[in-house]
Image (cartoon, helix red, strand yellow):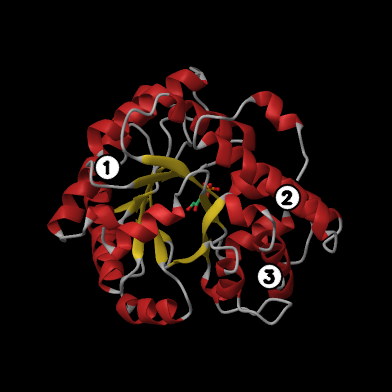
């Protein structure tokens, strides 16, 4: 097994998933404003350090995606943030894209930027302790979109990114996110996500990316958030698994879903259901941002020095998601907040 495959499998080992704590300063400022906390670099670190030193880091969080500011910060004990993460046997990762910008030629759509100077930045991040990376492409669903231009240009950028990351001896997380905004039904999400994945894997192969040393971070197959036709968790799981089986090559070791605006419980329940019927070799896990942090952030905002209770909430959420990676979660377990 290659070193990269080992890292990918360690991140998504049994009961483990990824904490996506790589909100840019702009996004983090919005999250903190929603709970009336000032977005200073000290406060951003304080919240993140509270999570990164929680007990569940050891059993349920195989990797943490950091933002440029955070990977360079020192914790209250003097350790660097990557050192703190490594002390729990979890692996530090880094978001390396520079965000989704207007796509020239189809300005209502987005293209993810950040390839210029990426090789040099990757060398620096490796030295700081990162062993995996993330790049997110976003696609809107409407009558006209995604356009062929958006499908092709984003897949091309993702593949160039992934090839450079493997050259730098890190595991690229390939994240093509089909947004849940809109009135479309689940079938439309399935069709669009299929096209997106097909295009991405065609480009990844063209760029000679070793798929065994990658992790896919996709959206689940869901109806739009304004859709009149709701879907139950069984339908979501069936359609999601079908889409992945049809479009993701077998060599990919692991799939870590984004939560994309689902509630905490929905994200856990849907992953659990997917794992109930998972008859593939893919490790199916989570790489959640909001669905791991929302309740913890709300509690922390009440008293930013109350580390214990915030960690308790984060530990519970991590544990619930850990259980869902082997289909062992159920709603009764949600009521137990013990750790
Ligand atoms: P959410 O789980 O909040 O969608 O965030 C995951 C992520 O990393 C988005 O890029």
Q: Is mark 2 within 8 Å of ligand 1?
A: no
Q: Residues within 10 Å of mark 3 (few under 14, many from 20)?
A: many
**CA separation in Å, label 2 and label 3:** 14 Å
Label at residue 102: none
- The correct choice, above or below, for 270 with respect to 58 in the image is above
Q: Is mark 3 within 8 Å of ligand 1?
A: no
Q: What residue is drawn where x is 62% and y is 56%?
A: 57
Q: In the picture, which quadrant includes the N terminus?
A: bottom left
- Residue placed furthest toward the front: 1
Disc 2 target residue: 296
* Mark 1 or 2, nearer chain start: 1
Image position of 117 (left or right of 44): left
Q: What residue is drawn where x is 55% and y is 74%?
A: 71
Name the quadrant containing residue 282.
Answer: top left
State the image coordinates of residue 24 (x, y, percent, origin top left). 55, 65
Q: Residues within 10 Å of mark 2 (few under 14, many from 20)?
A: many
Task: Residue 185: tell me if it is visible.
Answer: no
Q: What residue is drawn where x is 24% and y is 65%?
A: 163
Secondary structure of the residue carrying numbered label 1: helix
Mark 1 touches mark 3? (CB < 8 Å): no
Disc 1 target residue: 197
Image position of 246 (left or right of 139): left
- The correct choice, above or below, for 74 with respect to 323 in the image is below
Disc 3 target residue: 45
């Amino acid at each position: 097994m290659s070193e990269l495959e080992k890292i990918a499998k360690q991140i998504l080992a049994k009961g483990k998933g990824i904490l996506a704590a790589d909100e840019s300063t702009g996004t983090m400022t919005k999250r903190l404003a929603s709970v009336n906390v000032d977005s200073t670099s000290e406060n951003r670190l304080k919240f993140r350090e509270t999570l990164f030193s929680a007990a569940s880091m050891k059993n349920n969080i195989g990797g943490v995606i950091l933002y440029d500011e955070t990977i360079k910060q020192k914790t209250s004990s003097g350790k660097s943030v990557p050192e703190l993460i490594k002390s729990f046997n979890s692996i530090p990762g880094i978001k390396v894209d520079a965000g989704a910008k207007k796509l020239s030629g189809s300005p209502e759509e987005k293209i993810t930027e950040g390839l210029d100077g990426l090789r040099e930045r990757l060398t620096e991040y490796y030295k700081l302790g990162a062993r995996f990376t993330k790049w997110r492409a976003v696609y809107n669903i409407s009558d006209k979109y995604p356009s062929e231009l958006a499908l092709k240009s984003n897949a091309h950028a993702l593949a160039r990114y992934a090839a450079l990351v493997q050259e730098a001896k890190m595991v690229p997380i390939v994240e093509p996110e089909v947004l849940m905004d809109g009135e479309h039904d689940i079938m439309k999400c399935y069709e669009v996500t299929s096209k997106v994945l097909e295009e991405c894997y065609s480009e990844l192969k063209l760029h000679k990316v070793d798929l065994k040393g990658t992790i896919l971070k996709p959206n689940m197959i869901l109806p739009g958030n304004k859709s009149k036709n709701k879907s139950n968790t069984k339908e979501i799981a069936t359609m999601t698994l079908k889409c992945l089986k049809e479009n993701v090559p077998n060599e990919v070791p692991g799939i870590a879903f984004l939560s994309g605006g689902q509630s905490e419980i929905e994200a856990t329940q849907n992953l659990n259901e997917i794992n109930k019927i998972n008859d593939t070799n893919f490790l199916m896990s989570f790489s959640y941002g909001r669905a791991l942090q929302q309740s913890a952030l709300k509690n922390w905002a009440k008293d930013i020095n109350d580390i214990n209770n915030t960690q308790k909430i984060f530990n519970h959420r991590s544990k619930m998601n850990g259980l869902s990676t082997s289909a062992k979660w159920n709603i009764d377990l949600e009521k137990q907040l013990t750790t």
